[in-house]
Amino acid sequence: MNEPERIRRALEEAETVAVVGCSPDPSRASHAIARYLLAQGYRVVPVNPNHSEILGERCYASLSEIPGDVRVDIVDVFRRSEHVAPIAAEAIARGVSFVFLQLGVLDAESARRLEKGGIGVAMDRCILVEHERLGIPAKSRNAGQASRVPSMSRHGIT
């Protein structure tokens, strides 16, 4: 868990990130980070049962409702810790390769189950912070758009 090289490899190889708990509210971290990921060239699949579309992308109620032909490489979780276990079970069933539990999201038992299932885990880590810290270059399909997206840190949107 929280292995820098595994995080690097996941971010470099991923094409699609499912953002669980993605909000349509631009002031929320999940929205800003989803926008950042889009600007970095990732395909973002928002997951929120209360919305049909976020950031111009179709939104799904859960990971299990994302069609099987949609590849999901990383699941980025913006839900309270007590909601992680069923999300982890869906990630295992789907066979994703990596799960980020955002800052403040802690569930050691779910992390152990994910790792036992061969899925890498970053717990209490921000995907945006890790992406920037590791110097992962933007994917070519949206390169150059990142400068228009605010940065997100523990101190809010900058």
Image: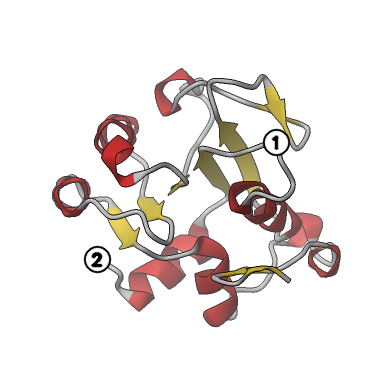
* Residue 51 in picture, x, y percent from top left: 64, 22
| Labelled pair 2, 1 in contact (Cβ < 8 Å) | no
Q: 24 above or below 17? A: above
Label 2: which secondary element: loop
* Lower sequence index among marks 2 and 1: 2
* Residue 147 in picture, x, y percent from top left: 83, 70
Amino acid type, mark 1: Pro
**Residue 24 — which label?**
1
In the image, what residue occupies the spot 52% across and 54% down?
Answer: 14
Q: How many C-alpha atoms fall within 10 Å of the one at disc 1: few (<14), some, or many (≥20)?
A: some
Q: Quadrant of the C terminus?
A: bottom right
In the image, what residue occupies the spot 59% across and 80% down?
Answer: 135
Q: 38 above or below 66? A: below
**Residue 1 — which label?**
2
Q: Quadrant of the N terminus?
A: bottom left
* Residue 105 in picture, x, y percent from top left: 35, 54
In the image, what residue occupies the spot 64% across and 49% down?
Answer: 28
From the viewer's perspective, tell me whether residue 132 is left or right of residue 97. Answer: right
